[in-house]
Image (cartoon, rainbow, N blue to C red):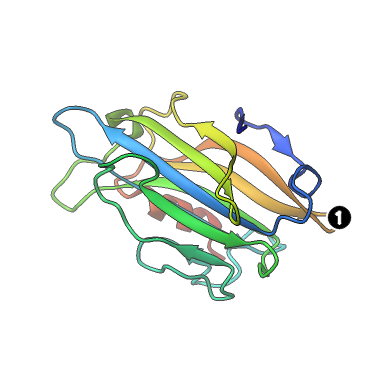
Amino acid sequence: MAISLSKGERVSFSKENPGLKKVKVGLSWDVKAGITADLDASILLIGQDGKMMKEDSIVFYNQLTSFDGSVIHSGDNRTGDGDGDDEMIAVDLGKATAEELLIVITSYADQNQDAVVFGRVKNASVRLYNGETNEVLYTFDLTEDMSNATAMEMARFYKHNGEWKFNAVGERAGTSKNGLEDIINKYSK
């Protein structure tokens, strides 16, 4: 049975899920009637200094695999149509060279489009799966007041005393037209 996480909640991932090294992050959303919205799931590979390890230390719709092979994105879904997860990212914690894997959710707007704030979507949630059995371990509902945001630091895996921990962050991280730019600007060296 999946555990519903609240903003700021921390989980000792290694202790709660001993031996589990492969996880998946799923993002799903629906658009409100008459609206178009493109949400994107991404993961940043963060080093000891709290910044992206390299310039290309991000896995997102335009770069589907991390430089160390530990993170693989399933590809971009631009509409939120369909049932289940709209975007999926697989993570192999055993391969990860980063100190932290930051999961972010951003919106994307074309040049001729106004910013797509999270308030334009409904039923947005993120699920964390056991990557071997596809069992849902944790869920995080995005319905908290992020109505005017275009970027959100969703959750993070981080190493502490040799074990992986998990934190449901749930913090607004940007309001610009392309939320991913806000995230990259914050975490670039």
- Visible in this render: residue 45? yes
Badge 1 element: loop
Kindly identify the amino acid type of the residue bearing the numbered disc 1: Asn
Farthest residue toward the right? 161
Image quadrant assignment for residue 105: top left
- Is residue 158 left or right of 121 when viewed as pictured? right
- Name the quarter where the N terminus is drawn: top right
Depicted 10 relative to depicted 186: above or below: above
Q: Is residue 161 left or right of residue 117?
A: right
Identity of the residue drawn at 67% across and 41% down: 167
Question: Count the marks: how many?
Answer: 1
Compare residues 154 and 181 and report the one nearer the observer: 154
Residue 60 picture location, percent across and down: 42, 61
x 57%, y 47%: residue: 129
**82 lies left or right of 44:** left
Return the x and y of residue 107 as percentages of the image width and height: 33, 45
Which residue appears at 39% of the width and 55% of the height?
A: 181
> Does residue 62 lie above or below 9 as drawn?
below
Please give left or right for residue 109 compared with residue 18 in the image.
left
Above or below: residue 130 compared with residue 90 = above
